[in-house]
Image (tube, rainbow, N blue to C red):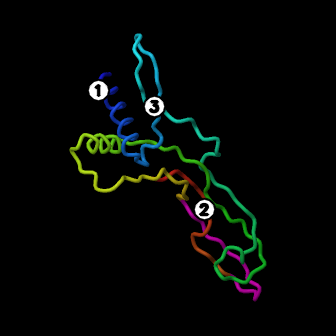
Amino acid sequence: AASGYFLEESLADFKLQLGLGFLEGIFLDQRKRDGKQEEVVVRPRRSAEEPCGLHSVLLPVRDLGLGYDSDEMVLFKYCSGACPRMLSNHDLTLATLQYSGALPHTTPLRHHGPCCRPTRLEDMAFLDNAHRWHKLEKVSASACTCIG
């Protein structure tokens, strides 16, 4: 428990002193335990944004921006939504080693949170205005997950 408190305290100080982007989700909170005031790390509030998932929009082929002249309407599916930021053991260890001076601080570390990305893509077929069929490979999402 004591080493856990030391790690939390070190990471909180590290975040405050260096302003590392990947530690932005760490917040300090003042709490009393056994009559003593102490600072502890607490998780941020969850976002009200919709979680990562598959969405779709019906639009004309020409709006896909791929240069096809077609009035045909297609269902384009895409991934969008919030992904939780989770610090890995590697992130925590790296921060501790840099804070202690065991590793040099060459440049500020920037670790962007995970992104909602497609894990599977499907093909799309349509008829253009000259009555020719076209098949676009891997253009529309069929499954999504948080990556990174």
Mark on residue 73?
none
Quarter of the image for the N terminus: give it. Answer: top left
Of residue 146 and residue 136, the one placed in the foreground of this image is: 146
Looking at the rendering, the stretch of residues picked out in magenta corresponds to: 120-133
* Mark toward the viewer: 3 or 2: 3
- The residue where tag 3 is placed is 28
Tell me if residue 27 comes above or below residue 70 in the rendering: above
Please, what is the three-letter code of the amino acid marked with disc 1?
Ser
Please, what is the three-letter code of the amino acid marked with disc 3?
Leu
Disc on the earlier residue, 3 or 1:
1
Q: How crowded is mark 2: few (under 14 residues within 10 Å), some or many (20 or more)?
A: many
Tell me if residue 71 comes above or below residue 142 in the rendering: below
The residue shown at (66%, 81%) is 134
Mark on residue 3?
1
Of residue 125 and residue 31, the one placed in the foreground of this image is: 31
- The residue where tag 2 is placed is 141
Tell me if residue 63 comes above or below residue 45 in the rendering: below
Q: For the stretch drawn in magenta, what is the main secondary structure?
A: strand
